[in-house]
Amino acid sequence: MKIIAMSDLHGYLPAVEGQYDLMIIAGDVVPLEIQTNTYLSQMWLLQEFQEWSNNIDCERVVLVPGNHDFVFVNNDIKQIGDKINVLINSSFSFQGKHIFGCPYTTMNSWAFHCEPYKTYKKMIPKRVDILVLHQPPLYGGLGMVEYGNGDIKELGSEKLTERIAEIQPQLVLCGHIHTGNHNEVRMNITRMFNVSLLDEQYRVRYEPKVIYL
């Protein structure tokens, strides 16, 4: 399976060349300037985002929202058009692979907030081949943030790390922390990638990640 993966677009829709089986987006797709406006966000998803997705040469698109994607919180959006599946603590099977999407992070006052004391164990099932998260696990620098003053802080979730170690999916995709480690990180049989496209100042910094599974 050939996958093209990305996250933290914040309205940026990159040119994607090549042919893929699956495109996966790990959160924060809606433009910053309209993220709290439900109507404008819906129109953008149905128009610009859907047209862009339809023009990419892939069979299916899996979208897991992020903490900036308020439009998905109170609206039962499970699919956009015929090609895009939206996963909010739900699963989708594709070419024999079980894909599970979890949009929750521990950021207060944002979309899909999860209290730190709550466990991801109740959210994420045991049988998962591809786990799509917005928040990164506390592992391998995937959640390492670089601030403008040079300070570095680890913002990954230890609870996510524990759950990944328990269920051992083949692939984990995340974002949220834009400047986290973008190299492949391994935990036993699990391959993990931070696939954010922008930096912490919302400037384009990275390319979409091509992954073979």
Image (cartoon, helix red, strand yellow):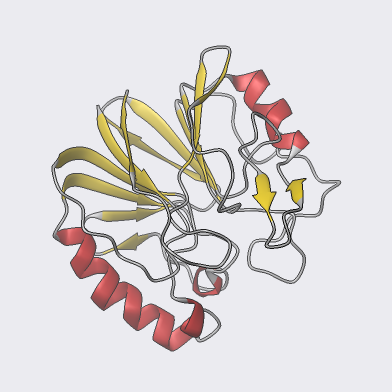
* Residue 72 image point, x, y percent: 50, 68
* Residue 112 image point, x, y percent: 64, 61
Residue at point 29%, 50% (across, down): 61
Residue at the outermost front position: 150
Residue at point 71%, 39% (across, down): 120
Residue at point 29%, 69% (across, down): 49
* Residue 177 image point, x, y percent: 61, 52
Residue at the outermost right position: 117
Residue at point 58%, 54% (across, down): 176
Relative to the observer, which residue lies in front, 35 or 140?
Answer: 140
Relative to the observer, which residue lies in front, 87 or 20?
Answer: 20
82 displayed left or right of 212? left
Please count the marks in the image: 0
47 displayed left or right of 161? left
* Depicted 201 relative to depicted 38: above or below: above
Q: Quadrant of the N terminus?
A: top left
Relative to the observer, which residue lies in front, 96 or 149?
Answer: 149
* Depicted 87 relative to depicted 201: above or below: above
Q: Quadrant of the C terminus?
A: top left
* Residue 32 image point, x, y percent: 50, 77
202 displayed left or right of 1? right
